[in-house]
Amino acid sequence: MGFPKLTADSSRPALPSQATLARGLREAQSTVGLRGEVCVLLTTDEGIRALNKRFRKKNKPTDVLSFPVDDPSFGSAGDLAISVETAARQAAEHGHRLSVELRVLMLHGLLHLAGYDHESDRGEMARRERELRAQLRLPLGLIERAAPLAASGSGRSSLR
């Protein structure tokens, strides 16, 4: 996992340890039932904006991007990229720790790696995310957070 450099005097919340993040990833991956190695890049809003522009043609930052592999026979399930800056803002907005928000984002990204796509399915990913989030004792997932916005017509651009 790549970690952005945060200084001790930074006003941003401290990142959880690599061991804590790896444990959260393993737990979520096991709960999803996704086999294979998953690499996670923790980056900045600018870093994820560049990835979003390159791979999705959207020139804006987002919270999490998923990059599934075409051929999992090599032992890899895919990669995730997470903006720590966006995760920290979302954690503050929803009243929980950065470590919790990173777990929410990893779960969401892992579901994409497992083949779910909330932009084209009929609620299957939302239902699965809700079930798994409850098992992992996590707060509202990304799809549930966006549901009131989508209903009001304002939409949410940070969802995959």
Image (tube, rainbow, N blue to C red):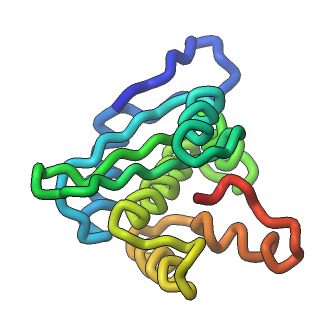
The residue lying toward the viewer, choosing from 150 and 54, is 54
Please state the horizontal and vertical placement of residue 57, each as a whole percent of the image.
63, 45
Q: Quadrant of residue 77?
A: bottom left
Please state the horizontal and vertical placement of residue 85, each as a whole percent of the image.
64, 34
Query: Is residue 151 among what the camera can see?
Result: yes
Please state the horizontal and vertical placement of residue 88, each as a whole percent of the image.
64, 39
- 133, above or below 131, in the image: above
Describe residue 88's horizontal placement relative to residue 68 as left or right: right
- Residue at 75% x, 51% y: name it: 93
Q: Quadrant of the N terminus?
A: top left
- Residue at 55% x, 17% y: name it: 6
- 69, above or below 118, in the image: above
- Residue at 49% x, 45% y: name it: 99
Q: Quadrant of the C terminus?
A: bottom right
Please state the horizontal and vertical placement of residue 125, each as a whole percent of the image.
49, 77
- Residue at 50% x, 65% y: name it: 138
Query: Is residue 13 among what the camera can see?
Result: no
Describe residue 63's horizontal placement relative to residue 21 as left or right: right
- 131, above or below 106, in the image: below
Describe residue 120's horizontal placement relative to residue 93 as left or right: left
Q: Quadrant of residue 71?
A: bottom left
